[in-house]
Image (tube, rainbow, N blue to C red):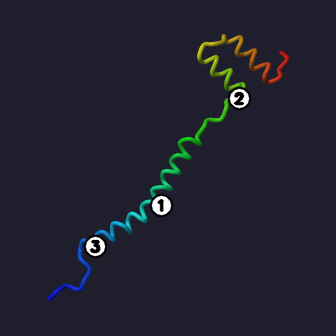
Amino acid sequence: MTGTGVPVWLSLVTLFMELLVLALPVGLVLVIVGLVQYFGSVPAPLGPEETAKQRYAAGAISRSEFEEMLRTLRGDRS
């Protein structure tokens, strides 16, 4: 008596192909989302006060220069 069913190897190949058809779009979406998050996370440019704070913290300007910059930026006349 010969078997009339589908061979096991053909069932496994079919299952593999179905999983591949489902996994490819999901993987593609995950890769695109990851790339957008990686390259889209550009830090916003610093404002003038933040730049002055960073320069003061790095020792590029003195305390008096820093305070003068802040007064100028804030519009203080004192």
Which of 36 and 18 lies nearest the eye of the viewer?
18
Q: Quadrant of residue 6?
A: bottom left
Compared with residue 48, is residue 1 higher up or lower down, i.e. above or below?
below
Q: Tell me which residue sits at (67%, 23%) in the image.
A: 51
Lower position in the chain sequence, tag 1 or tag 3: 3
Give the SS element for disc 1: helix
* Nearest to viewer (mark 2 / mark 1): 1
Residue 18: quadrant of the picture: bottom left
**Residue that label 2 marks:** 47
Residue ID for mark 1: 25
In x, y percent, where is residue 16? Answer: 33, 66
Report, in whole angstroms, how far the alpha carbon at label 2 lies from the one at label 1.
Answer: 41 Å
**Could you tell me which residue is drawn at 71 percent across and 29 percent down?**
47
Q: Secondary structure at mark 3?
A: helix
| Mark 3, residue position | 10
Question: Could you tell me the amino acid type at mark 1?
Answer: Pro
Q: Position of residue 17 (x, y in %)?
A: 36, 67
Q: Looking at numbered disc 3 in the image, what kind of residue is underneath it?
A: Leu
Q: Nearer the viewer, residue 74 or 4?
A: 4
**Measured along the vertical axis of the image, is residue 58 above or below residue 21?**
above
Q: Judge from the rendering whether residue 8 lies leftward or rightward of residue 28; answer left or right.
A: left
Q: How many marks?
A: 3
